[in-house]
Image: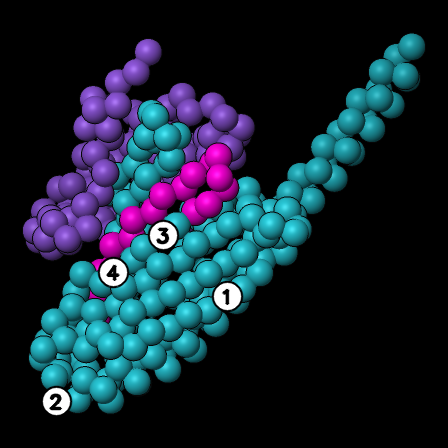
Chain colours: A cyan, B purple
Amino acid sequence: MKFFQAFHKFDHSWAQVTAANWQKYPNEQCPHVIAVDVLNRHVDPVTGVLHTERLLTCNQNAPALVLKFLGGSTLSYVRETSELDPRTQKLTMRTENLTMSNVLKINESVTYTVHPQDHSTTLFKQEAQIVAGSALSRFSSYVEDFCLKRFHDNAAVGRAGFENVLDKFKAARLEAASQLEKLEKAAVAASTASL
Amino acid sequence: MSSSIGEKCTKIKQEYDSCFNTWYSEKFLKGDVTPMCDDLFFRYKDCLLKVLEEKKLDTLLADARKDNPFPNSSANSESNKKD
């Protein structure tokens, strides 16, 4: 068993980060995520927490040897469950792979919280547990190390992808605000002209 | 906007996503939890469940839920009745 941990700070508010989180895919850095489906979703009437269960369909680039294990298919499925508490402003997402779990099981947990000192930014914490399954018992340590390295590299790529999504959202917000300003100016000009 | 696992569900899924994203930012984060997209979600889910069954992913999901259950909305509201 191997553990992975990473921290990051996003220079966007928690509201912006969590709103973008639902629209994270597709993004250029993560072309392997080919579909995202919402399986279940509701707001707990007592706690006000938004619970969501999603299914991610991924098309992984796998080496020939791994493809042999997979029986020729590169499609893999990941289940994600999340709890989003608007009162404490905390989003927790857990993911687990549904396919190939006898070969390798990866449980990941990610949290997004408001930075305690700077409310305009968001703290990101990522933890993962990697366990090679019984099918690979002889090579488990080797496979776990290999996957830990891959996970580490991919986590950085995933964060970069999300940063791009956040930047696009910010640009769209600024554009909308400037359009609104132009419209308001035009409206003021029109109303003064008619006086 | 992301696609659905079932090609035929993508259109309704994206309609639902648009509705949800608006609801999330404009209502939910402002404290209003009144549902707004239920009709779209039911139609999307109706399509999705059939695809999951066709791809035999329903059993895979059921197994995963045994270890890590997804909280049931009706059970919560039933067991936590107040007022």
Secondary structure, magenta segment, majority class: strand
Q: In the image, is A28 to the left or to the right of A58?
A: right
- Looking at numbered disc 3 in the image, what kind of residue is underneath it? Met
Q: Secondary structure at mark 1?
A: strand
Mark 2 neighbour density, 10 Å: few (under 14) some (14–19) many (20 or more): few
Q: Which mark is residue A96?
A: 4
Specify the quadrant of the image occupied by residue A179.
top right
Query: Marks 4/1: CA distance?
Result: 20 Å
Task: Give the x, y percent position of residue A155.
Answer: 43, 70
**Does residue A158 lie above or below B76 as drawn?**
below
Residue A77 visible in the current orientation: yes
Tell me the chain of label 4.
A
Comes first in the chain, label 1 or label 3: 1
Query: Marks 4/2: CA distance?
Result: 23 Å
The residue drawn where x is 47% and y is 36% is: A86
Task: Give the x, y percent position of residue A57.
Answer: 26, 58
Stretch of the chain drawn in magenta: A74-91
Q: Which mark is residue A7?
A: 1
Inspect the magenta stretch and tell me whether residue B47 lies in it: no
